[in-house]
Amino acid sequence: KLMEETTETIILSGRKISKEIKKECKERLKEIQSTFITKGPPGLAVVLVGNRPDSAVYVRMKKKAAKLIGIKNIDIALPEDVSLQELLKQIDSLNENEQVHGILVQLPLPSHLKEDVVLSRIRLEKDVDGFHSQNMGLLAMKGREPLAQPCTPSGCIELLKRYNIPIAGKKSRGTGSIEYRRDTYCFDAYQRKCNCHYLSF
């Protein structure tokens, strides 16, 4: 006799969880500012190279979220043909700027720019994307905690956590064409004892 298996469908609302997280971040930021002597709001520098429509959308969404929780946006827009030396010079300047607490370089970069060189140039404590080589190395090591973790896998895992869905011992599968997303997705899953398989195309 066949046993009928029943399953419950759960709709994971990213928009709902996003609102909760933004509210928590806004409250947390107020606590930090009331505890420490600060010179105004924390600053997030967003570096955008070229005019890719998808990158512009991502940057606009990130800036909107930052402003909502009380973070000051600092825009650095560079032409598509900017040289590697000029881009590194901009990052060096942001590293030394005391009004900049976090640096985000929107990926992908034009093909003539070396992403690994650019991302490693960002000072570790200002690497909000978690792509610095040291942060990536810590993410790849079981039991270690990087200063920052890449948002795509972290967001997926946070969504599951908020719905009390355990992932330890489970199998996960991702697809995509961007190498750094593949690596960070698998590293993050590994940290949480989840078997990851990623299909690149």
Image: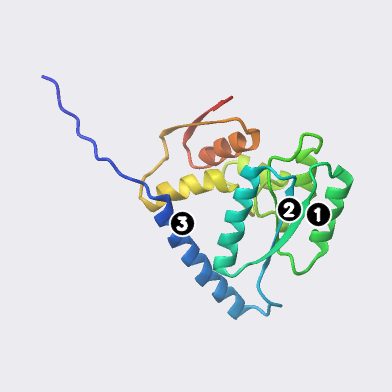
| Mark carried by residue 91 | 1
Residue 47, which numbered label?
A: 2
Residue 39 is at least partly visible in this image: yes
Tell me which residue sits at (38%, 50%) in the image.
13
Left or right: 93 as drawn, with respect to 32: right
Mark-to-mark CA distance, 2 and 3: 23 Å
Mark 2 touching mark 3, by CB under 8 A? no
Distance, label 1 to label 3, CA atoms, is 29 Å
Quadrant occupied by the C terminus: top right
How was the colour assigned to the protein in this rendering?
rainbow
Q: Position of residue 109 (x, y in %)?
A: 73, 40
Determine the secondary structure under disc 2.
strand
Q: Count every numbered label the image shows and give the total.
A: 3
Q: Inspect the image, locate mark 2, and give the three-letter code of the amino acid beneath it.
A: Val
Left-right relation of 58 to 15: right
Query: Residue 66: horizontal and vertical position, in percent?
Result: 59, 63
Task: Give the residue at mark 3.
Answer: 18
